[in-house]
Amino acid sequence: MSSVIEALVKELGDQVRVGADIPLRNHADASGLAPTPPQVLILPRSTSDVATALRLCHEHRQPVVIQGGLTGLAGGAHPQAGEIALSLERMSGVEEIDPASATLTALAGTPLAVVQQAADEAGFLCGIDLGARGTCTIGGNIATNAGGNQVLRYGMARRNTLGLEVVLADGTIVRSLNKMLKNNAGYDWTQIFIGSEGTLGVVTRVVVGLHPKPQGQQTALCAVSSFEDATAVLRRFQQAHPGRLLVFEAMWREFMTVATQICGLSPAFSDEYDLTLLIEADMGEDPEGTETFSAVLGDFYEQGLIKDAVVAQSQADRNRFWTYRETPYEYGRFLPEEIRFDVSVPLDHMTEAVEHLRQEMPKQYPDAIWVVFGHVADSNIHINVAVKDMDDGIKKGIQGLVYDLVARLGGSISAEHGIGRIKRPYLPLSRTEPELVLMTTLKRTLDPAGILNPGRVL
Amino acid sequence: MSSVIEALVKELGDQVRVGADIPLRNHADASGLAPTPPQVLILPRSTSDVATALRLCHEHRQPVVIQGGLTGLAGGAHPQAGEIALSLERMSGVEEIDPASATLTALAGTPLAVVQQAADEAGFLCGIDLGARGTCTIGGNIATNAGGNQVLRYGMARRNTLGLEVVLADGTIVRSLNKMLKNNAGYDWTQIFIGSEGTLGVVTRVVVGLHPKPQGQQTALCAVSSFEDATAVLRRFQQAHPGRLLVFEAMWREFMTVATQICGLSPAFSDEYDLTLLIEADMGEDPEGTETFSAVLGDFYEQGLIKDAVVAQSQADRNRFWTYRETPYEYGRFLPEEIRFDVSVPLDHMTEAVEHLRQEMPKQYPDAIWVVFGHVADSNIHINVAVKDMDDGIKKGIQGLVYDLVARLGGSISAEHGIGRIKRPYLPLSRTEPELVLMTTLKRTLDPAGILNPGRVL
């Protein structure tokens, strides 16, 4: 046994697992990289256990991979050979809900769904939500600045985070369990750790701000003929009903074609349109919420902005509308192997981006089945490309096509999934040299031995 | 002439002013500290001029004070003997409004009112707003993470900032003029500079996110008998009409007594109540907005939460309601010398805080005239204390009373005004030793020669 493992076992006892005692789940995250057993798995029960573990790893210059719910798609939590895994799964639980401040305090390893449930039972809504809610952890959400479907209304994880407890690389515990919306007492150091993907410190405890529960939620599918019309609908809706839009998802023509012709869903409209929008709004306690919502869409129809629309009259309708948006989860059953992209494109270049793909994709990859969809109000689109007999050459080619396009249009190669290991080679496409130098300076300052999630982000 | 001044004059020519050529306005900020002429005033015309100035000062280890609109209350921009002042006043102008992305790009020295006006003319609202809007600059707002009356709805300056251009202490220019709501491509390094009060870098250009313009703004004054009832009104209003509250200001009994008995305003209600709330909501394009707004308040009245209320029927009414909230600007005409506090208190301790002041203030300072008011939805209260024959001993005593109380209740000694020079001695009351060490580490890393706003914050 190496000296660092001996030291860990001595101080942390049965919180340290080796060899066959390490569950398979800790060998991989959701990135699709080949499973790799970590050298050791540490399962701390408390912040001070995390501090002990990091202090020893720091002293021994032992690389550590930080694990939460292991749902990340960029390889951030995926072990590399020789790394020790530190999993926060035992540090789970909501510690406090403060209704006066509308805040919730939880241990970092608490699953997001547990946080959401606790907020709901206390009469509030947790503004962080994403598909992996049952498995992902609130600490992981904050460490990766998670996005999701409701960013338009509640912001990314950053905006929902009021306080943090973090263990630094050398084992120092830094804590600001702030519950106040306004606190300008010195630097807000917590911002550095949000979205740093575990490379600058380990989030162990969080304070999230809660929101009023939506009432009278309304859902519609709308057909529009151009992205420009889609953004006009977005801005005019926000103008007419400020603060009410919850969801504004766009699915381009190719996406709906795959949904209906390959995944077997019935067409949403009798004609085909360039974009289908999935719109949700919280109309509050207004008893005429459905009528008001329908009336706004009716106005847009009369103005020619919307070509067709259908408003959900029941939860069953609502579920049916969401089925379109969720077809990508089913692509594995219907399509050949895919590459999935999570990128941002400035809204004034979105049409150009999609048109470029429409021109280049059939030319370069005639057999490719590809779709564009996403949270367009946030500039965030997902691009999925499925190709028969996918190989590394094709992958690299498609990645080049998409990332070069995004870089040329001033977009971001990662909207919400982070950089991790997988997107690291492409980071210079979205960041200038002085930015990369500044990031590296921060990394060296906060983790001088380079033990935290090495090879991720930078 | 010292060698650094010679070098500055050589490279920047007439952008460098000395002696009597330095206007008096650059001798002081709004903190009330004794005016002090800077050694030199630099008036750069461009980011590269700022970079040149900082590079030379860094090489010569020459301390620099950064100046924007000079409206800060904490002494951050107030020159200290021997410092060179770098004022961004010539770097003014809105460079772009992008309606698709709903963003505005401006030079840091642009007055906030100019930014607001440009946003308004383009059909949007700038979410940053505060009393000093005519003079303060957008760069200063972001460098200090400014708050204001509408933080409840639009957040602090941080939430409104999408991109920044910053010049580091050594003259390096770092730029991320991001317009996208979602961008997780590496660390969001801009967060470090927001609220750092010019001690880590100089903000030279900003991208702010814009909001839909409020429509159908409604205003009311409401009387409530306890802070608990006030928070119940806040939460229930948010629940019934999500996203509509713009302003939720509280004025405690003592405040209204000063407003009516000393400043000469007519009483708002026929009885006296423990708290008066100033509430504004954006009811959107709803033609029945006024009725809906009044009906909600009517419900609260019937539930006993609100004891009395008056809804503005005209802009004149609205202005009259705001007159109460703005009486503190007039205190100089009516009251002896004051100390003003800007603190945060967690909402579940707010009543305890006010009751403690009600008990201790008359005991320790029988002649004091003191008031509590503020943006309570954000946990932020202002406490003004006027005492005849104020001296340093009394000041220190009152500061001790207020800051010890705030520290004991887990509050913040600076809600929105920052730390600057004036609150620096009290920072350890709101921050632990590991937090201060971490802040100092960041400062040393980003400004190793310690030239940027030395003695501010840390």
Image: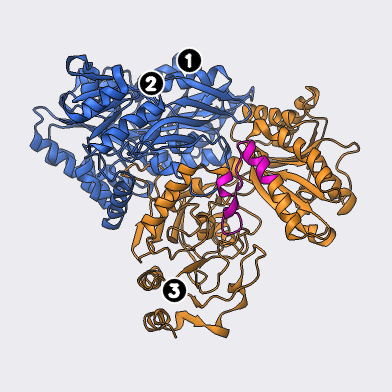
Chain colours: A orange, B blue
Q: Chain of mark 2?
A: B
Could you tell me how far apart the alpha carbons at marks 1 and 3 are, in whole angstroms? 59 Å
Left or right placement of residue A132 versus residue A369 in this view: left
Q: Which label lies toward us, 1 or 2?
A: 2
Could you tell me how far apart the alpha carbons at marks 1 and 2 are, in whole angstroms? 41 Å
Residue corresponding to mark 1: B315
> In the rendered view of the protein, which quadrant contains the C terminus of chain B?
top left
Could you tell me how far apart the alpha carbons at marks 3 and 2 are, in whole angstroms? 56 Å
Q: Residues within 10 Å of mark 3 (few under 14, many from 20)?
A: some
Residue corresponding to mark 3: A45
Q: Quadrant of the rendered structure where residue B26 is?
A: top left
Q: In the image, is residue A413 part of the stretch drawn in magenta?
A: yes
Kind of residue at badge 2: Arg
> In the rendered view of the protein, which quadrant contains the N terminus of chain B?
top left
Along the line of sight, the residue nearer the viewer: A100 or B87: B87
What residue is at 56 percent from the left and 36 percent from the top? B243
- The answer to whether any part of residue A186 appears in the image is yes
Q: Using the image, determine if residue A135 lies above or below residue B433.
A: below
Residue corresponding to mark 2: B45
Q: Whole-percent x and y of residue A213?
A: 58, 47
Q: Chain of mark 3?
A: A
Q: Whole-percent x and y of residue A104?
A: 47, 55
Q: Using the image, determine if residue A18 lies above or below residue B116.
A: below
